[in-house]
Image (cartoon, grey):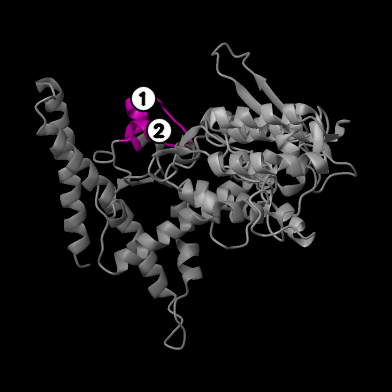
Amino acid sequence: MIDELGPHVADLRRLRRADQQAKDAQLVRRLFDEDRLTALVDGHLQAGSPLPRLDPRQIAMRKARGWDPGDPLLEVNFVHLLRPTGHRDLAPALFRQVRPMLEEAVTRVGVEFVWCRNADPVPRADTGEMVPWSLPMPSVRADSLVRAAGHACIVATSALTGMRASELMELTVGCHRASSDDGTGLARHRLVSKVIKARRWGGEVDEWVVVEEVVRAIALAEQLTDATTGQLLFGPFQGFNSNGAMDWLRQWVASPAGKRLGLAPIPDEPIHPRRLRRTLAVEMGARPGGLFATKVHFKHLSVATSEGYAARPGGAQAGFHQEWKQAEAKEKLAQTVEAFRQFQQGQLPAGPGADALMATFRTVEEELDRNDPGPAKMVTDRQVELLLKKKAAALHLSAANYCWFEDPAKALCLKLAGAKSASAPLTGLCDSARCPQATHHLVHRPIWQTAADNGTALLSSPRIPAGEKTRLRAEQERSQHVLEEIDKASRKAK
């Protein structure tokens, strides 16, 4: 909504504002000049442009005042029709006189809503097919669309930054700051807000390092508000539910307009900035590679994100960083326990580090056996977690392997990089097929299968040079070898 529909919605709002200002201007009450009206209608006929259509609620009001439901002129919006003449309405005598001409015009060109006629094409969200970004709509629906787009900006900013609702409400017009003084030409984007929670009365000014997607959301939001520089951008809002931002957005996405654009319905579940903040932290902790995976999925720049966490150790973004680290620790422990349970079931790990990992698991089993509580009780997951907690702390999740980074001196990636020591592995240099601290499990099999299939397809292509095929063949053989090891280990019994 922000990138594809946002610019069009901003233009629609500017037109709506200009129309409202013209409507509030001191216009002449009634038009008496038949020639001016005739010239106006002729212009519509020559251009093949339908006459302005009245909003449905105003049509209902006309019927309540006694208009015939079958009147051909019932749906004509005379205020919009007469806007170029500077008049608000037709004189009753002139209306009776020109009725045949108006009815003929309706028969020839029809009536249609003024807003979003001949809309520019945009790609559908599901198929990419180019369709008009909107069908003609009445004023009330145009205003609802503008409001839904504004709420999309709130939701996107919340989901991509982890900001609390109170921090979102404190954003002002002009809150974006950009700097590129590091000589790289790359901009660092920040949002200036206030932290209210656990702060003195009035809050404290703080900055959030954000990515370009958030900057675009803020830029659109500034075009959808009447607030001026320094005034609140979003202002107080009722969360994301109870007729709040999420409800408006959910309803518009589920409407015929959203379906026509191929938007997937938003699940009807409670959503709040607290949940988005927590979800972002959990996803960052659970995804292999942490910040690297977040960069790929959320289009984050890891350098900028890390800068935001380190810039203000006591700031709000550092607090969010702590939440992420806690979620990551829980995910590492859960994955370690899962690997232990698979080991107990006979699904053994593979890879160069498999023997060391199984030795740890056997030690845990022996510890559990020595502290057997007897037949009346069972070993709880908590007991297993306590025994595996130290091992889990050394785990680094990767898409294609588990890295048990216990001894930096044994890490192949550090040797390849020439680094003597480090607090974390260098994921970009990982060669898990040779690293003595890497293991492969069934969960990693689809990744290696995809790599093997891609290698087979590339090797069969006549467009690949012979030298490149030599390199690809080695990669494909490595993938096949890892797959064979995973399959062999998973079938072994203890």
Q: How many C-alpha atoms fall within 10 Å of the one at disc 1: few (<14), some, or many (≥20)? A: few
Sooner in the amino-acid sequence: mark 2 or mark 1:
1
- Give the labeled residue for mark 2: 426
Asked whether residue 317 is in view, the answer is: yes
Q: CA distance from mark 2 to mark 1?
A: 8 Å
Q: Quadrant of residue 435?
A: top left
Q: Which residue is at 71% across, 47% downward? A: 164
Residue type at tag 1: Ala
- Residue 297 in percent (x, y) is at 46, 41
Q: Secondary structure at mark 1?
A: helix
Q: Secondary structure at mark 2?
A: loop
- Give the labeled residue for mark 1: 417
Residues at marks 2 and 1 touching, judged by CB atoms closer than 8 Å: yes
Q: Quadrant of the C terminus?
A: bottom left
- Relative placement, left or right, of 317 versus 235 is left
- Residue 104 in percent (x, y) is at 59, 41
Boundaries of the magenta span: 410-430
